[in-house]
Amino acid sequence: MCGERMNKFCDFIDDRIDDGTFTPMVNAANSSMRQIGKFLVFFVYFISALLAFTSFFIIIPYEQLYKPAWLLITLSVFGIYFLINIQYHYYKARTIAPVANPGEEGDAFCDKCNYWKSDRTHHCSVCERCIYGMDHHCIWINQCVGSHNHRHFFLFVANLTLAASVIIFAGFQSFYDHLFMEYSPYTFCTTILEHAPLQDIICEYDGFARTAVVFSYLLSGILLVMVGGLTFWNFYLISIGCTYIDYLKRSGNKKKQQTLRNRLNKGFKSNWKNFLGLRRNRTFFRCVIIPSTLPPVIFENINTRYDNFDIV
């Protein structure tokens, strides 16, 4: 009985989708996601500015009470490096336009875009276009992650994870002292600090230092868990030569799994070299350590010497 009711319900939903009943609701939801995405972009910049300000002007100066100068200088250098990388790769991930990669007659046809779409191309209803090498639509960058920006997206989340780790390591004593102020002999605003250029200005606002430190530390912990998990998940997918959509396709029948595995997975080293663009005499230092932009493969310019699914 339950099975019959479920089948009838599924048939009802399919009929409503086919006749366009849900189209206005779907369009409204997609439009809302685009608008929310615009807000979240500004929110990301605000949060990153708050974390940077708290780290460099409150936590690092306060930690001189507990840590040697050489360690604080080292943490500051790493912090500046991660901040530059985060801002650079986030900007690139959200602004680089998707690759134009039309298919040929006989390929899958996109009814919404009204043209053939090549292999590994997926239509995004939020972006309202087909995305080559699509991984997923990310509301935090307000566009899809695909072959055009996947490298920048991964380096953004990887650097954000490392930056959160640095804050967790560097700021524990600051967090503890300001969370339990009644038990602590020091706080940022009750101690004269030698290397705290904005101490007087910050402490004019009652409670700001404590709120900023506690909030930034807890937020860093959340980022470390959530963004860190996303980073490791992307690391796994890249290592096997897949996007998330490729992975879902691989989850079908065994024959399709084997076909996609042979076609996409070129081995751990080759997968990462293709993903990071470490070909054509490009080095890891110049392409990864130093923030840089590399052009993706354009469909019309694919050379037979290279694999059609290589991402550079």
Image (spheres, rainbow, N blue to C red):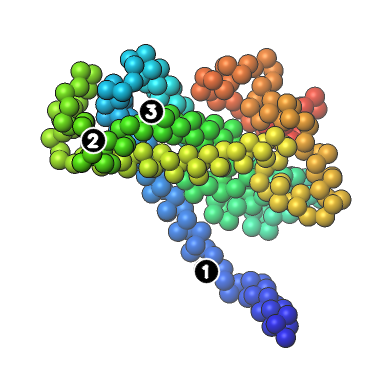
Assess disc 3: are there few (<14), some (14-19) or many (≥20) residues with their C-alpha within 10 Å of its C-alpha.
many
Quadrant location of the N terminus in the rendered image: bottom right
Q: Please state which of the two labelled residues, at mark 3 or mark 1, is closer to the viewer.
A: 3
**In the orientation shown, which residue stands out farthest toward the right?**
255
**In the orientation shown, which residue stands out farthest toward the bottom?**
1
Residue linked to disc 2? 184
In the rendered image, residue 126, in percent from the top left (x then y), is placed at 54, 54
Observer-nearest of 163 and 144: 163
Observer-nearest of 160 and 19: 160
Are circles 1 and 2 on residues that touch, CB within 8 Å? no
In the rendered image, residue 61, in percent from the top left (x then y), is placed at 27, 24
Q: Residue at x 74, y 27 (%)?
A: 270
Residue 141 in view of the camera: no
The amino acid on which the numbered mark 2 sits, given as a three-letter code, is Ser
Q: Please state which of the two labelled residues, at mark 3 or mark 2, is closer to the viewer.
A: 2
The amino acid on which the numbered mark 3 sits, given as a three-letter code, is Ala
Among numbered discs 1 and 2, the one appearing first in the sequence: 1
Q: Secondary structure at mark 3?
A: helix
Q: CA distance from mark 3 to mark 1?
A: 50 Å
Rendered position, 28 above or below 128 = below
